[in-house]
Amino acid sequence: MKDLQEYVLDLPLHTVAFFSLVEATAKLVDVSERYWQAKGLNGARIRILVEIMKEGGTILPSMLARKIGVTKSNISLLLIPLEHEGLIIRASHPKDGRKTVISITSEGQSILLKHLPENRQQIADKMNVLEEQELQQLLILLNKLTRM
């Protein structure tokens, strides 16, 4: 029991920092998720549409899977509802017919244009507890962690 307390109660600074980061992230993600749910939308699907737009509106499934952190087989399952809703289309790669590309449709773009501004504002409202200099420092620190 005493040995276990070392990992539960007597936390070193790096572990406290890690769990604080996880908790802060979870709270911000919850703000975003509640927004999407209130609009009758799925935040994970919106993220897929955003990632496609970041690549100019068209992306390879394998690249999309890497960007959102899922396997290649799981990306196919995640794309099915988006395709059924007319938010994306799949087509043959223009240079390599063996590959498929995913493109966001005008309907998918419209959903993003309609909802992203308000969603982003809700996140900004929560992040405004930090001053601009603190936000810049946070970005530096987070980038340092992501380059591990």
Image: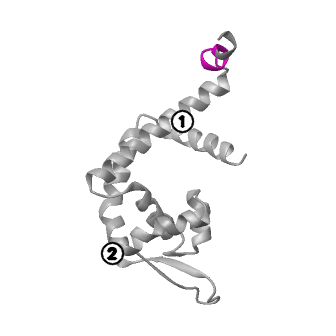
SS category of the residue bearing label 1: helix
The structure residue drawn at horizontal position 40% and vertical position 70%, both measured from the top left corner, is 82
Q: Vertical placement of 80 versus 23: above or below?
A: below
SS category of the residue bearing label 2: helix
The structure residue drawn at horizontal position 70% and vertical position 14%, both measured from the top left corner, is 3
The structure residue drawn at horizontal position 65% and vertical position 20%, both measured from the top left corner, is 7
Neighbour class for label 2 at 10 Å: few (<14), some, many (≥20)? few
Q: Who comes first in sequence, dot 2 or dot 1?
A: 1
Q: Vertical placement of 89 versus 78: above or below?
A: below
Q: Which residues are magenta?
A: 5-11
Given residues 79 and 22, the one toward you in this image is: 79
Q: How many marks?
A: 2
In the picture provided, is 119 more to the left or to the right than 2? left
Q: Which mark is residue 107?
A: 2
Q: Which mark is residue 22?
A: 1
Callout 2 amino acid: Glu
Q: Vertical placement of 73 versus 86: above or below?
A: above
From the top left corner, tell me how far across and down residue 62 is, in percent. Answer: 62, 69
- Asked if labels 1 and 2 touch by Cβ distance under 8 angstroms, the answer is no
- Alpha carbon distance from label 2 to label 1: 34 Å
Q: Is residue 6 magenta?
A: yes
Neighbour class for label 1 at 10 Å: few (<14), some, many (≥20)? few
Given residues 9 and 133, the one toward you in this image is: 9
The structure residue drawn at horizontal position 41% and vertical position 61%, both measured from the top left corner, is 46
From the top left corner, tell me how far across and down residue 96 is, in percent. Answer: 65, 88
Rendered-image quadrant of the C terminus? top right
Q: Is residue 22 magenta?
A: no
- Residue extending farthest right: 148
Callout 1 amino acid: Val
Q: Quadrant of residue 127?
A: top left
